[in-house]
Amino acid sequence: MQELGHRRPSLVLKFKVGDQQDYNLDLTLRPSFVSSLYVRAGESAWHKQVGLLSGSMTVRQVDGLVEVWVAREIDEGTKRALTYELGLWDEKPSQRLSTLRGELKEQVKALTELFPGVRLSIAPHDFNCIFIAVTLSKRTMYEVFVRKWVKGLWDRWRCDPAIIASVELEDLKSVGTSYQLANLVRTLRDYVRLRVDVCKDEPENLRRALMSCWGVGPKVADATLLFATPSPWIVPCDTHLRRVSRRLGWIGEGVRMPSKALCLNLCCDECVDRFGPCLKVEIEEKFKGFGGWIQTLTYLFGGAICTSSSPRCSRCHEVLRDYCKERKARS
């Protein structure tokens, strides 16, 4: 194990997680915005670069064991926080599959076979960091650009929203010249004025508060809550979720995306009565209690296999190919 800081790291946590179907560290961290707080440290190993235990912690998976090495003393509260961050608080995929029936169970089981061991990695203790990373992710590729931008931000200003909100645009050029970075500063100027209690406020109240910030819509608010609060039912609606849901027949062609104007001014029941269900409501109803986990699976599937153009059908699961409406339409 590499040296961390001035003190040799010690093994502080060791979890037996069973086989890869139960838990996979890489597939849990990679699709989560929590991964923006880490850098890769070798095969199946991640090193924390910002937030809780920054610069002092490395986590790795060795076969059926997850090991956490830390170069400082930590208390029981910090150990509990790490179970959130590593996704070990979340239900096993097999437990969620047991609640489904029929076609849905077959389809989700196939997704878990393509991407085994996915859990929800969350960081309530690093809420600000997650919000910054999610805000930067609008209309761009997370792995290619966002992870590069946040590393530049963390290196210069850590993840302090008040400091970043006061940064001059000229100074941001050391990180990048994209409009997402310029917009982040404007969003954070609203964010730092919010009066919210992440630990006590209900997710719906947090959602509305986040959407009161300039540039924050349902997708950013929901993704922040999914990866920064223990709320696995929350569904951030992205293009991967919509595309996969249509192709597998979970939704019809006319299902709309959530709207900031409607979400801010109407409760969900009233909105559905007047305008019909949006994608968020459809997925939450279809996968009660764990729609956010489903969204994470479709993010992986939609990005690697079921792409918008030139989908890699040869790499798809045979069960999913049988259900795919687009494939049937081409036949």
Image (cartoon, grey):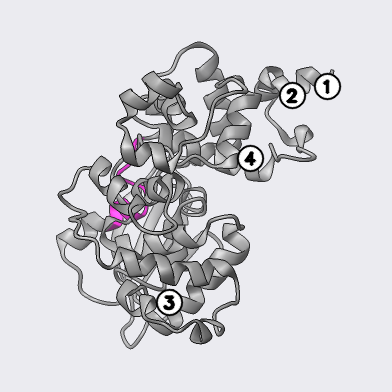
As measured in the structure, the alpha-carbon distance from the residue carrying label 4 to the one carrying label 3 is 29 Å
Question: Which of pointers 2 and 4 lies earlier in the amino acid sequence?
Answer: 4
> Which three-letter amino acid code belongs to the residue tagged 2?
Glu
Q: Start and end of the magenta stretch?
A: 82-91
Residue found at x 33% / y 29%? 268
Amino acid on which disc 4 is placed: Gly
> Mark 2 against mark 4, which lies toward the viewer?
2
C-beta proximity under 8 Å, tags 1 and 2: yes
> Dot 1 surroundings within 10 Å: few (below 14), some, or many (20 or more)?
few
Could you say which quadrant of the image residue 18 lies in? top left
Q: Secondary structure at mark 2?
A: helix
**Circle 2 residue:** 326
Q: Mark 1 sits on what residue?
A: 330
Q: Earlier in the sequence, mark 2 or mark 3?
A: 3
x and y, in percent, of residue 269 in the image? 32, 23
Query: Helix or strand or loop: what does disc 4 sit on?
Result: helix
The answer, for residue 273, to whether it is visible in the render is yes
Residue 154 image label: 3
Query: Residue 267 shows which numbered tag?
Result: none
